[in-house]
Amino acid sequence: MANNEMQVERGLDLERYMGRWYEIASFPSRNQPKDGVNTRATYTLRNDGTVQVLNETWSNGKRGHIEGTAFKSNRTSDEAKFKVKFYVPPFLPIIPVTGDYWVLFIDGDYQYALIGQPSRNCLWILSRKPHLDDEIYNKLVQRAKDVGYDVSKLHKTPQSDPPPEEEGPQDTKGIWWLKSILGK
């Protein structure tokens, strides 16, 4: 089934999608610390229709973050296919890195979502709350498997309850990003 084109959500209400999402599970990425916890994303709609993206994770008690911009892949399509652009490394933002962000599934109340990419190399399970019911989690995993993802690569992201406050000791200058590239 991996050769079939993935179906994505249509008619996504971007305003309802905005706000904070907690990473419940994901494929490990070289762009995140291996020991990252409390990983989350906050989306803010801009006047021009693009989305400000703030990704945060905590590693060794310090908050690392990177900011980017998301925009529709095709402005005239109702498909929830987006591109996300970050500049790396965060401490010297010169190189633009753009990736796909496809909303494969979202529940009717906009409380949990399955995000993927056509390459099937990246996968995220997101929730409005730091924890997700096992039954819902398993349904999202099965949905990913059904469209050709190797779900054995999914790694659950530890989340505190309650989640950390807005700010905390900051991992300044994006050192976490550099460490993650070096495999630390």
Image (tube, rainbow, N blue to C red):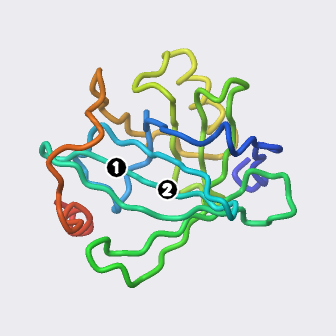
Tag 2: amino acid: Val
Of residues 150 and 60, the one nearer the viewer is 60
Residue sticking out furthest to the front = 47
* Picture quadrant where residue 115 is located: top right
SS assignment at label 2:
strand
Q: Where residue 160 appears, x then y in whole percent?
A: 27, 26
Tag of residue 171 = none
Q: Residue at x 19, y 43 (%)?
A: 168
Reply above or below: 24 against 33: above
> For the residue carrying disc 2, how many other residues have a C-alpha within 10 Å: few (<14), some (14-19), or many (20+)?
many
Q: Residue at x 71, y 62 (%)?
A: 72
**Can you identify the residue that label 2 sits on?**
53
* Picture quadrant where residue 179 is located: bottom left
Position of the C terminus, as image quadrant, is: bottom left
Please indicate whether residue 175 sits to the left or right of residue 130 in the image.
left
Tag of residue 56 = 1
